[in-house]
Structures are given as structure tokens and as C-alpha cells.
Image (spheres, coloured by chain):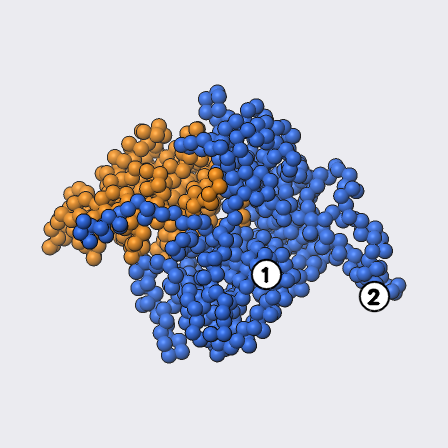
Amino acid sequence: MTAPFSHLDLLEAEAIHIFREAAAQFRKPVLLYSIGKDSTVLLHIARKAFWPQKPPFPLLHIDTTWKFKDMIAFRDKTARELGLELIVHVNEEGLKRGFNPFDYAPSVYTDVMKTQPLKEALDKYGFDAAFGGARRDEEGSRAKERVFSFRSPGHRWDPRRQRPEMWNLLNGRLGVGETVRVFPLSNWTEKDVWRYIAREGLDVVPLYFAARRPTITRGGQLLVLDDDRLPLQEGETPQMKEVRFRTLGCWPLTAAVLSSATDIHAVVAETLSARTSERQGRLIDHDQSGAMERKKQEGYF
Amino acid sequence: MTALTAIRRAETAPELAHELNGILHLLTCGSVDDGKSTLIGRLLWDASDLYEDQRETLERSGRTAGGSTHPDFSLLVDGLVAEREQGITIDVAWRYFDTETRRFVIIDSPGHEQYTRNMASGASHADVAIMLVDARHGVKRQTRRHAAILDIVGVKRVILAVNKMDLVDWSQERFRAIESDFRELTLRFGFREAIAIPVSAVTGDNVARGSDAMPWYSGPHLLEHLEELPARDTTPTGPFRMPVQMVLRDGIDFRGLAGTVSSGCVCVGDRVTDALSGASAHVLCIVTMGRDLEIASQGQAVALQLDTDIDVARGAVLSVPDSKPTVATKLEASLVWLWETPFDPRAGYLLRTATDLTPISALTITSLLDLETLAAQPAQTCTVNDIALAGITLGRPVAIDTFGANPATGSFLIVDAVSGATVAGGVVTSAHNGAEKTSGATFQLTREMLQKGLCRDLGESEDERREFQRRANEAALLLHAAGIPVKLEL
């Protein structure tokens, strides 16, 4: 091969390198699988990194019970087809006490149904490293994230304990009680993720493609109703609209966009010419200034 | 076909998923006062496809300066709340933007002296560095310090952005004076390319467009220059190296050595050697998911299946038989101390090379680099932000190169064995096996040689003899640092 590598080739090779370094250095890694497009790319590269072996770690999904039904179906199908172990963890206590995304502030809900059970699951199974699909281009406080992001006992992220990373040397030696989050897609952008999905012909959750779906408009954002658990406010009548998602999370907290992009090429084209950043559609980030940084210190991914 | 469907067709054509040709990693170094955040913000604002919600946030934050209102570009890059409150940039931040043909990665590092370590770690990822100076102040000691750090971690291309030209009335004379200081400075280092560009980040002159205010400047504006630079060198250069990350297995038949080719290339049928064990085998197959390759080049992540099972594990460096890395137990190195806890000769340290982790039996600091004068001052200890020359003795042999010959297999981290912290990062300047007689390769620096040149102005007084000794040590240190084993014969 004499042709220079494209930037996607370079990003893919870097991610494979990171996967292998982590698998070689940590005792018991796990891949945090959140079903979205980033997880799809993450999992695909994990398969490449260890081919022809299967990835030497299970998938872990923290299920808030508020994911779109299509997401859950996609998750189960993916794990089954690839023959990978899938661990699904729910905060049963939070569920019993009725924490939901509309009666509680997004930050409280996220803490109870996502952050706490994530820590619980990592402790329960004794995972010392967790792969995640976070990208530095997603949000301000992530721009300084390391590839190996260390967590003190209790899973707290302490900016002062983060290790400098030089060249492509990755130091995974853990201190007592430390664990690590590993981000192989650190240097990818949203556009790269879509370009790569198109290039590799990967399957994604159908919600990323435009279809007529029942929607309401709340707080200037377009919400798709996935079931009848969301109490409608006065004047809200579901309307069928052609929409899709740029980012997927809990359905009452994830805004859809009007779109007619029904296939991968249309989605790529739309992404490449998008005028707003994807996190615009995540209601959780607008909750308070510096929201992501605070969540991270508390142990959120 | 109507015009509308034509447009639709074009919009959804697969070629829109085009891939960019290469990635340029761009380090920006300078302090808040030099307007670094503003420069990066301006670059993003003018040259990249910023999202509208980001633009709106900025326009709302507009600051009035000199009668006109500009968005506060620095808000695009000052990330963490803690940092925003203090108004300084502490950590290395990563930004990404694309032009038509190229991905740019901006590695934004703090400039102040107390953050030398952050700059060094950021610089280790960079292909090119922009050093920022204020046109009113010119090249300062900080600029010298930055150049020294860039040189040590291997940055080969540098740009001096002479910012705030609007505050010196776009003076050509002023710029030329700074440019000439810069030339003089860069000649002291091993940079492949150095260029000075007069800019104003606030007005945008010469950042992502030319400048009407400075018709006397005929060179490229900043973005133009960046787009023309060669991206990270992915054409295979140097001899083949592949540090083995792990061994992959599948059934009883498959044993693959997984790794990223760190230099050169390897083809099916090539003979490869593990320098540590001395064992060799031929490449039977270059495996990746989807298809096997005929050749794997620098930067590619692959798995090599060999024709005979040689006992190779993580930590090995595969090479061609006629150009192997050195199997060494003694290293000379330049390093930057990265951790708050100072060097402690009694602490246990480990050496992390490409994929190996080796106990260090002795780490000796020999001198500290004075970043002001660039002279090495004899020293026994070092602490955070220091740049030191050091000797490292390893508990067992490691396969390693000198950084100058092969950066990927010539760099290392020093790891605290107990806390796991990365306490230092460094480059190997010379590597040898402690057991070897080094006389053949060692340079003998004699009294006669020094008397002829470097010390010919010195007589026999006590002070002059001391000075003679000092210069001799200095010369020996410099030769050491340049990778030449040297023995003083005085």
C-alpha cells in the first residue's frame, strides 16, 4: 500500500492501538455499550483490534428503563449476533422509588439512574477498566480528557490526579483502589463517526434515520413519544412528524430534529452540513452551567 | 431531472462521505497575555465550520474593545469551569476542525513556566508548533524555553506568530526585528523549518485571511501555511519496527503478534527478528479483520502470523535482522519531570517503553537544563517542570532505539511503581548494554583536545583549573546528550 492513509484510517489504527494497550495492561476490562452510534463504532473497532479472537471483555449496558424500545431491540440483536456476553444493569432501588426523567431535574435523574448504577456495576463485577465512546469534541470539559482517564476510589474524577500522556505511550499501572475509563475514540468528531459508519457499512439503531413519529414540542425541543409514560401537559397533542435523532439517550431527555434523511448517505450529508452541535439535543447539558464537568467529578462517564 | 432533485441527488451522493487527506497536529504555545486563546478562537471562527449554537454563545459574550465589539473568541477554548473562573488555561485541551482537505487537531497547551510539563506532554503529539509572542514585547525568555522543549520532544516545524500587530501600528520594522531574533534562536535547535508570521488575532489579519493593513508582508497567512505543511509523515521511513502489544490466539492454529508498525514497513515473506531473544522467523500472513494484507506500513495496526512459533510476547520489538534496536540495560536520556512529587533516589521506578515495562535499578540525574541559557547545570535531583539529563540502569534488558533515530521506540515514561503515576517522560539519547566493553564506540575526550580549542584561554591557576574541569564536564554532557558515549581522559 503506497497511498497515504486517510484520516479515518489513522483514527481507526489509533483506536485499535488503544484497545490493545488497555486489554494487555488491565486485569478485567469491560466495554460500556450505550447502543448509540459511538458505541457502534467502538464495538466494531474492538472486534478489529482482537480479530480473529473475540474481544476479551463483555459489554455492559446501564439501562435506565427509559431507552427507546428500538434501542433495546438493537442492543440484544447485536450481542446475540456477535456472540458477546452482555451485562444489563438497572438501579432497581431507583426504579422502585420512581425516579423518572420528567418529575426530577435531569441532573438528579441522571445521577440516580445512570451514574450510581454505573459505579455499582463496575464494583459488583470488579472491572478495573471500562471502555467508553466519549469524544473530546463533544463538550468543553471533555476537551481535556485523557485517553486513559483515572478514577480515584469511589470512581471520582480528580483533574489533578490525571496523568500526562506523551507520544503514544499509555501507562495503565493502577494505584490502590484506582480504576480507569478508556476512550479509544478520543480524537474522533461526530462527522468522523458517521463517515466511518458509512464506510464500514455498519448497522445503527433505526432512530438515526428519518421516519414519521409521534412528537410533541416542549421547551422548544421536539420530543418523540416512545410509550405512554410521559404525562402530557395542557395543549400538548402528539403530532406525526418526519424526524430523526442525532444523538440517542433516554427518550424524554433526547430531542429529535426534523429531517428527511432516511439512509446512511443522507445522514452523512446532513451531518457534514449541520449547523448546530449534537449536544444541543441533550437536555441534560442545559441543566446548569458546567453540568458535564460536575457530572464527571461525581463519576458520570 | 428537475433542479431540485439534482441538488438532492448531489447532497446524498456517497462521495460526500469523503475522507480527509491526513491529520495535522498543531500545538499552540504561549500565555494568556499573548492572546493565544484568542488566536485559536479566531482560527476556529474564521476557518472552521463552527456550529450556530456555538457562534450564538460567543456573540452573546461579545466584548467591547477599542470601540468595536468582537466576540470573545477565547471562550471557545477555555474549557473547565475552574479554569474559566481563574481566567487561565491549565491543562492541555484538544480541538478539532476540518478545512476542505485536511483535519486539524489543535493541541492547546498552557505557556507559563509552572506548566512546562503540560506543554511538553502536549508537544509530544505535535507535528508543528505555533509559538506566540506579543509584538510589543517580542521574543522573550518564555519563547526560548518553549523552543527548547519543542526540540527535546521532537517537534520539527515551528511557526512564530507575532500577535497584536494592530497594537504596534502594523510596523514592518518591529516585525523584522522580532523575526531576526527568532531566526537566531531557532538556529540553535534541530528544527527542519521555522517561519515568522505577523498577525492580529483580534482583527483576524493574517490568521485565516491576508492583511490589508500589512501590505509589506508577502508570505503566507497562518492558515495558508498550515494547509501547505506536510501532514504527519505516514510514508514509511526508517527500518521496520513493531512493538508487540499482545499475542492473539484463535483455536490451535492461529497465533498472531498484534501491534502497530511504528516505523518502516513489513511484507509477507520478510524475515523478522526479536532483538531481545535473537529469534527470527518469516512473516506468513498479515492479518486484519476483513482482509489479509501483503504489506503493513508505519502507522498500521495489524497482527503478524509467523511461519515458526518463536517465543515472543508483549514487550518485544520486531525488526528486520540487519537493523535491530539495541538490547540495553543502560540508557542516557533527556527527560521532563511531570509529577508534583520530586525525584526520590530511594523510590521504585519503572520504565515504560513502547510496550514494555521494566524495573529501573538506578536512576541518576546528572544535570538540569537551564532553559534560559540552554546550558546544562550539574545536579543530583529534579522536580516538577524540570528538564533533566539522566542516566538509567535497568533491572533487565529492554529493546530500545535512540529517539533521534527512531522516535516511537526511543521515547519512554517513568512510572512510580507504587502509585502508578507517570512521573517523567523522556527521550533516549544513547543506549548500551552495561556488560559490553564500550571502548570501541566511546569517544575519548582528552586534555590535549580541550587545550587546543575550547580551553585554550585557560592557564594553570586554581580558578582556571576549575573552569577547565567545568568546561570538560559540560562538553562531555553535551556529547552524551547528543547520543555519543564519551569518556573523559584528563
Instruction: Provide residue A114's location: percent of width, then percent of height.
Output: 32, 44
- Label 2: state its secondary structure: loop
Q: Amino acid at mark 1?
A: Ala
Q: Nearer the viewer, residue B489 or B470?
A: B489
Say which residue appears at 11% left-offset and 55% top-offset.
A235
Question: Crowdedness of circle 1 by 10 Å Cα count: few (<14), some, many (20+)?
Answer: many
Say which residue appears at 30% left-offset and 37% top-offset.
A203
Give me the chain that's blue. Answer: B
Instruction: Provide residue B8's location: percent of width, then percent of height.
Output: 23, 50
Eyeballing the image, is A79 above or below A232? above
Q: Chain of mark 1?
A: B
Instruction: Provide residue B173's location: percent of width, then percent of height.
Output: 55, 77
Q: Amino acid at mark 2?
A: Asp
Question: Crowdedness of circle 2 by 10 Å Cα count: few (<14), some, many (20+)?
Answer: few
- Label 1: state its secondary structure: helix
Q: Earlier in the sequence, mark 1 or mark 2?
A: 1
Which picture quadrant has residue B64?
bottom left
Structural distance between the alpha carbons of marks 1 and 2: 31 Å
Q: Nearer the viewer, residue A165 or A48?
A: A48
Say which residue appears at 84% left-offset and 60% top-offset.
B452
Give me the chain that's orange. Answer: A
For the question of whether residue B88 can be seen, the reply is: no
Eyeballing the image, is B52 above or below B282? below
Please name the residue that numbered disc 2 is placed on: B457
Q: Nearer the viewer, residue A237 or A19?
A: A19
The single residue placed furthest to the top in the displayed view is B252
Q: Say yes or no: labels 1 and 2 on the same chain.
A: yes
Please name the residue that numbered disc 1 is placed on: B147
Say which residue appears at 83% left-offset and 66% top-offset.
B457
For the question of whether residue B276 can be seen, the reply is: yes
